[in-house]
């Protein structure tokens, strides 16, 4: 998929990259761990589609047992659906602490986790290694930044490494091929606290749609833990045609969890430029919203993902007011996740309880590196 300005088109690339890249997601905004899980899901889906195994290690620092985290449910869904493909290691204590509270236990736990990660990276057995919350570990001085950077520089060529957490240190950013920062955005009208369960991901950086896939996993996992069926709808605008690896990821989920995931796409297989909209663009956008609006109102879905809705509204293919009304009236326990860049924030942004803007500080595509299915598009 190629993104240029406001608009999206499918890209059938002839020279996909074979080498793995180092991704860093940091910042104070929400979505960093979610985007890592979204990349994992895409990689697994692509592997299944191509009759290959994409093994994944989830190394979670500062997330010891005794506390529940947002991504726990998503990881449970992954492990139940693909038990032979997912390995997970958790280290640290289950509480927040600052530099003045560091103990010998914290240093030992961080080193234990890194020893596992370093062995996994060197082994070449994994397709993806997620170093969740390694950024604050390095920032606290619990691990040697030089040691981590040295290991990453000598990783197997095929391996994707994803590092998350606030405040990534400069040496790690320097060695990374991709760096996206997630910043929380606040309402202009502070009298409106936002509607619980409405999340928006915007910006030019990589990670918006991928984070939404992580939310789909969370919903399914929460249902499993509560012995309930949490249905998910993924509605995608401006993504007509074929060849998106979201399709492979969602197909993998539906194979493991039949009847829990519905997926609809609308739009032409072409970029849509402002001022060059065609009648079919309006028809397709409206068709997508009729499905999405009905799904939100029905209460049948625990999570409704409105992928690339923002540029659709920004291109004036859809009005914002029906979306505002649908969010105001949504069932309390239905989550709505809205993604996509836009230049002119529509009115429904004021209703979000969470709004993260993803800033692009570095992307390997800018240096002529080919994109890779299952990770980039």
Image (cartoon, rainbow, N blue to C red):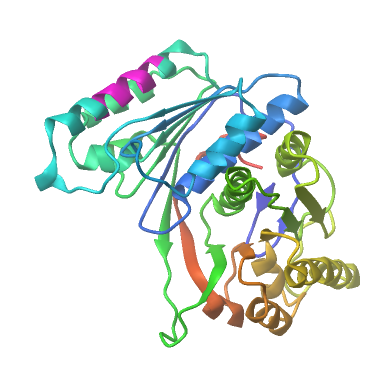
Is residue 152 left or right of 332 when viewed as pictured? left
- Where's residue 315, x and y in %? 71, 73
Residue 104 seen: yes
- Where's residue 170, x and y in %? 27, 42
* Towards the viewer: 104 or 348: 104
Is residue 113 within the magenta segment?
yes
Residue that appears at 80% across and 45% down: 259
- Where's residue 233, x and y in %? 74, 56
Is residue 8 within the magenta segment?
no
Residue that appears at 29% across and 27% down: 148
Q: Is residue 19 above or below residue 227?
A: above
Residue that appears at 43% across and 56% down: 182
Residue 16 seen: no
Residue that appears at 65% across and 37% down: 42
* Towards the viewer: 360 or 142: 142
Is residue 35 left or right of 114 when viewed as pictured? right
Is residue 61 left or right of 52 when viewed as pictured? left
Is residue 351 left or right of 161 when viewed as pictured? right
Q: Residue furthest top?
A: 123
Residue 292 figure quarter: bottom right
The quadrant the C terminus occupies is top right
Q: Residue furthest front?
A: 227
- Where's residue 313, x and y in %? 69, 74
The magenta stretch is 110-119
Q: Main secondary structure of the magenta part?
A: helix
* Towards the viewer: 7 or 305: 305
């Amino acid at each position: 998929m190629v993104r240029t300005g406001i608009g999206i088109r499918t890209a059938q690339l002839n020279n996909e990259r074979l080498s793995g890249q180092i991704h860093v997601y940091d910042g104070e905004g929400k979505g960093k761990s979610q985007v890592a899980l979204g990349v994992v899901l895409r990689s697994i889906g692509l592997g299944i589609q191509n009759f290959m195994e994409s093994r994944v290690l989830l190394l979670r620092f500062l997330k010891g047992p005794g506390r529940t985290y947002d991504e726990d449910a998503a990881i449970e869904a992954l492990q139940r659906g693909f038990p032979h493909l997912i390995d997970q290691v958790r280290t640290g204590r289950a509480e927040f602490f600052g530099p003045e509270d560091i103990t010998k236990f914290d240093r030992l736990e961080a080193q234990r986790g890194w020893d596992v990660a370093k062995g996994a990276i060197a082994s070449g057995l994994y397709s993806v290694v997620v170093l969740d919350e390694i950024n604050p570990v390095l920032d606290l001085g619990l691990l040697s930044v030089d040691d981590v950077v040295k290991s990453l520089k000598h990783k197997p060529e095929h391996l994707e490494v994803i590092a998350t957490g606030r405040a990534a240190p400069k040496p790690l950013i320097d060695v990374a091929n991709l760096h996206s920062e997630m910043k929380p955005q606040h309402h202009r009208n502070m009298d409106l606290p936002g509607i619980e369960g409405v999340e928006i991901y915007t910006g030019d950086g990589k990670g918006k749609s991928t984070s939404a896939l992580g939310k789909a996993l969370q919903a399914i996992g929460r249902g499993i833990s509560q012995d309930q069926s949490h249905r998910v709808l993924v509605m995608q605008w401006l993504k007509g045609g074929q060849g998106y690896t979201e399709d492979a990821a969602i197909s993998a989920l539906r194979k493991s969890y039949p009847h829990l995931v519905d997926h609809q796409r609308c739009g032409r297989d072409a970029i849509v430029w402002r001022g060059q909209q065609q009648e079919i663009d309006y028809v397709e956008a409206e068709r997508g919203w009729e499905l999405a609006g009905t799904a939100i109102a029905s209460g049948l879905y625990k999570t409704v993902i409105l992928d690339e809705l923002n540029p659709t509204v920004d291109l004036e293919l859809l009005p914002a007011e029906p979306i505002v009304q649908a969010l105001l009236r949504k069932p309390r326990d239905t989550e709505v996740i809205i993604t996509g860049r836009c230049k002119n924030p529509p009115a429904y942004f004021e209703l979000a309880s969470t709004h993260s803007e993803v800033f692009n500080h570095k992307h390997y595509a800018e240096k002529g590196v080919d994109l890779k299915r299952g990770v980039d598009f």
